[in-house]
Image (cartoon, rainbow, N blue to C red):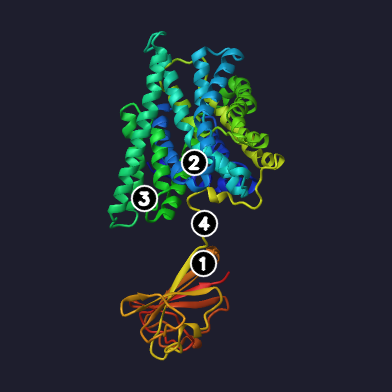
């Protein structure tokens, strides 16, 4: 157990370090996680033998649930609405067309059997939003015509359709139905997958929204726990009755993420960290499960499929669906290039591997090679491709596509108690000399909040509430606390008597339940907590 914890902690720390390195060079961080998994794998440096595909499937399914939920929860619908129609068309019909074309290519050119070729196309049908936006965020690239929002919604919502195709083809390969009844079975499966997934997603989202509006969490952090339980329920409930759990999970995420719920910004940050960890897990496990010696046998067909998928199948699907909607060639080209394969393809390949069906080809390692090629080549060249197609929006901000972006300038409020002897007592508001860009928002008087007017007179015991633009460089502020006891050399001395370093400023004194903004004559007492800002 201790060895597993030690290895796990070292792997996570190595992944975090790799993330910093890859961001600096514009390489998708998920590529580093795969290579790290290979380094720890059975044929790597550490030679950890791991081939439990069933365990890997269960673990990766849980990880993909959280990734799908956050894909919806983090999507800013206000930014995505203008391109939602195009995005959903690409994620549904686009995924089906891409999968079918890829499957036919595998059958006709690579001589796969019909169903195995179609299964390969279905597994590779979805794109990976995490890979795309790890590049766009690290390079701060915003795209023209809301293409970044389009890619986010498409990549977040096409996994359910690839999953549905994979289930249908696996069911056909198991031979549960005769040839004449196969089309009917496919239609019923598709209807139940989509219908029950949509119904469950809407129902769970509305119930969760009502709960959040009428229930107050007594303990900090329970709102995040509630969201975790909701995302798991959104997958498990429809899956138990034959619906599409991934579709339900994404729908619940997007409905809750775009509803004004308490503490949303911190929830987005929480799920951002959680899904980053889940992506580390999936891609590390992909590398851990792989055998580099087996890649030699599949790299030629994998390369052929990757080239066809990137240069023919996805561009054909994009052109067929987007040309009638007046999307230009440059936008279609970038959308085609940004169709990176990633976490979902890995999970579906593992699902096919443990399905019990005998496959003629090593589907897992084929998908491994394709994901590796897609992330390393397409992902790395994405900024260059966006520049060459003149699709970079230099005045835009890619963060506006996410729910953790605040459209309005952040405002911070401070309270200013008016005590005996304050120079503002008896003055009208119009006479006050406030700092520039500072506004008197309201004042508290005998328990009431009053909106100030120019002729409002400031009285003793008033509490003025001032608003000003927030300082965004929080990393530049380094606060430390010093607790004063009766033996401390500062005890009993005035602030002006202290010989503090030039880079240190006392900004607050906590005295019991009172917070004191200090001046030079402020005397430090035993029990005080001195808060200092250190400028580095």
Quadrant that contains the N terminus: top left
Q: Which residue is mark 3?
A: 224
Q: Nearer the viewer, residue 380 or 59?
A: 380
Quadrant that contains the C terminus: bottom right
**Depicted 449 relative to depicted 248: above or below:** below
> Disc 3 and disc 1: Cα gap in Å?
26 Å
* Of pointers 2 and 4, the one earlier in the residue sequence: 2
Crowd around label 3: few <14 · some 14–19 · many ≥20 (10 Å)? some
Quarter location, residue 132: top right
427 with respect to 43 (left or right): left
The answer to whether the residue labelled 2 contacts the one labelled 1, judged by CB atoms less than 8 Å apart, is: no
Q: Secondary structure at mark 4?
A: loop
Q: Secondary structure at mark 1?
A: loop
> Disc 2 and disc 1: Cα gap in Å?
34 Å
Crowd around label 1: few <14 · some 14–19 · many ≥20 (10 Å)? few
- Tag in front: 2 or 1: 1
> Disc 2 and disc 3: Cα gap in Å?
21 Å
The mark found on residue 201 in the picture is: none
Q: Nearer the viewer, residue 400 or 368?
A: 400
> Disc 2 and disc 4: Cα gap in Å?
30 Å
* Of pointers 3 and 1, the one earlier in the residue sequence: 3
Quarter location, residue 316: top right
Q: Judge whether residue 149 can be spotted in this image.
A: yes
Q: Secondary structure at mark 2?
A: helix
Q: Judge whether residue 356 can be spotted in this image.
A: no
**Depicted 163 relative to depicted 72: above or below:** above
- Tag in front: 2 or 3: 3
Crowd around label 2: few <14 · some 14–19 · many ≥20 (10 Å)? many
Q: Which residue is mark 4?
A: 407
Q: Residue at x 37, y 20 (%)?
A: 188
Q: Which residue is mark 1?
A: 470
User: Where residue 410 sits: x, y (%)?
Assistant: 50, 63
């Amino acid at each position: 157990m201790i060895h597993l914890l030690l290895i796990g902690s070292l792997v996570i720390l190595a992944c975090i370090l790799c993330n910093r390195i890859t961001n600096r060079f514009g390489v998708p961080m998920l590529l580093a996680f795969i290579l790290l998994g290979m380094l720890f794998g059975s044929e790597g440096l550490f030679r950890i033998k791991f081939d439990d595909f069933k365990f890997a499937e269960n673990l990766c399914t849980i990880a993909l649930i959280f990734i799908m939920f956050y894909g919806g929860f983090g999507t800013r619908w206000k930014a995505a609405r203008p391109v939602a129609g195009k995005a959903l068309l690409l994620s549904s019909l686009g995924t089906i067309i891409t999968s079918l074309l890829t499957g036919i290519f595998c059958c006709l050119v690579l001589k796969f059997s019909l169903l195995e070729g179609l299964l390969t196309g279905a597994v590779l049908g979805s794109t990976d939003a995490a890979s795309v936006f790890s590049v766009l965020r690290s390079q701060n690239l915003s795209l023209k015509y809301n293409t970044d929002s389009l890619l986010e919604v498409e990549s977040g919502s096409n996994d359910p359709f690839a999953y549905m195709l994979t289930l249908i083809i696996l069911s056909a390969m198991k031979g549960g139905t005769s040839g004449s009844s196969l089309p009917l079975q496919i239609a019923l499966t598709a209807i139940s997958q989509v219908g029950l997934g949509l119904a469950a997603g809407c129902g769970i989202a509305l119930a969760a929204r009502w709960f959040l509006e009428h229930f107050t969490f007594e303990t900090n952090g329970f709102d995040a726990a509630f969201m975790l339980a909701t995302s798991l329920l959104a997958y498990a409930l429809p899956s138990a009755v034959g619906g599409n759990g991934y579709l339900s999970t994404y729908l619940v995420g997007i409905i809750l993420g775009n509803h004004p719920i308490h503490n949303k910004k911190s929830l987005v940050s929480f799920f951002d960290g959680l899904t980053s960890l889940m992506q580390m897990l999936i891609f590390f496990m992909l590398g851990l499960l792989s055998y580099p010696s087996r890649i030699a046998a599949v790299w030629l067909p994998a390369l052929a499929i990757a080239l066809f998928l990137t240069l023919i199948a996805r561009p054909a699907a994009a052109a067929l669906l987007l040309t009638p909607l007046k999307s230009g060639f440059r936008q279609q080209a970038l959308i085609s290039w940004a169709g990176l394969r990633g976490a979902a393809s890995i999970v579906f390949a593992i699902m096919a591997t443990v399905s019990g069906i005998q496959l003629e080809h090593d589907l897992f390692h084929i998908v491994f090679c394709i994901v590796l090629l897609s992330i390393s080549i397409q992902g790395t060249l994405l900024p260059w491709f966006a520049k060459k197609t003149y699709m970079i929006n230099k005045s835009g901000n890619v963060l506006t596509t996410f729910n953790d972006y605040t459209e309005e300038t952040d405002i911070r409020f401070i309270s200013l108690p008016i005590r005996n002897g304050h120079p503002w007592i008896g003055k009208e508001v119009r006479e006050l000399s406030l700092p520039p860009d500072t506004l008197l928002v309201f004042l508290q008087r005998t328990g009431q909040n009053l909106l100030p007017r120019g002729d409002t007179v400031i009285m003793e015991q008033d509490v003025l509430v001032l608003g000003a633009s927030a300082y965004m460089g929080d990393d530049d502020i380094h606060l430390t606390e010093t607790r004063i006891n009766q033996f401390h050399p500062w005890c009993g001395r005035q602030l002006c008597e202290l010989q503090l370093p030039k880079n240190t400023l006392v900004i607050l004194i906590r005295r019991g339940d009172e917070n004191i903004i200090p001046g030079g004559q402020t005397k430090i007492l035993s029990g005080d907590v001195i808060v200092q800002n250190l400028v580095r």
